Amino acid sequence: MSAGGYVAVLVIDLHFPDVGSLKGKRKELSSIKAQLHGRMGVAVAETDYQDLWQRARLTAALTGGSLARLTAAADTVERWLRARCADGVVVERVVLSLDELRDVPEGAPDREPRFGRDE
């Protein structure tokens, strides 16, 4: 059990087979991002495939003091995405306690400096 809380990171790969332009993709993504943020309080950003018409990658983050509540919230996000994006969505989820984030070894690949440490 973590005294400091938990973080869930969702890497969301989306496929838009009916979109024929970047403008159409932007419209779809704007709606998805606004609903995730507004309805579910999820921090979300487009993190890859910006130049492709029919593909997008979003990275979303949720936090919570209870692992059970955080897991339930992440489950809700995944269910909503699967219902909204029936043509194609793949979600990868990572959940860590804040203690685990603090304990990531120095020099771990693809890791930025962590909070709580003077570097």
Image (cartoon, grey):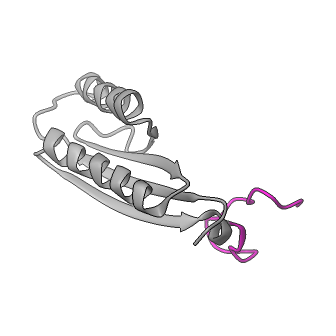
Horizontally, residue 2 falls left or right of residue 14, namely: right
Q: Which residue is drawn at 75% across and 59% down?
A: 113
Residue sitting nearer the eye, 80 or 45? 80
Horizontally, residue 69 falls left or right of residue 3, namely: left
Q: Is residue 20 above or below residue 79?
A: above
Residue 5: x and y, percent? 60, 58
Residue 98: x and y, percent? 64, 63
Horizontally, residue 37 falls left or right of residue 110, namely: left
Residue sitting nearer the eye, 104 or 108? 104
Q: Image quadrant of residue 18?
A: top left
Q: Indicate the quadrant containing the C terminus: top left, top right, bottom left or bottom right.
A: bottom right
Q: Image quadrant of residue 102?
A: bottom right
Q: Image quadrant of residue 44?
A: top left
Horizontally, residue 18 falls left or right of residue 72, namely: left
Residue 60: x and y, percent? 44, 46
Q: How many numbered dots are placed on residues in this image?
A: 0
* Prevailing secondary structure class for the magenta stretch in the rendered image: loop
Q: Which residue is drawn at 37% across and 38% down?
A: 51
Residue sitting nearer the eye, 90 or 15? 90
Q: In this view, does 86 lie above or below 30?
A: below
Residue 76: x and y, percent? 28, 48
- Please check the rendered image and state whether residue 38 is part of the magenta-colored stretch, yes or no: no
Q: Indicate the quadrant containing the N terminus: top left, top right, bottom left or bottom right.
A: bottom right
Which residue range is magenta in the image?
102-119
Q: Which residue is drawn at 76% across and 56% down?
A: 115
Q: Residue at x 22, y 27 (%)?
A: 21
Residue sitting nearer the eye, 18 or 111? 111
Q: Which residue lies furthest to the bottom in this view?
A: 105
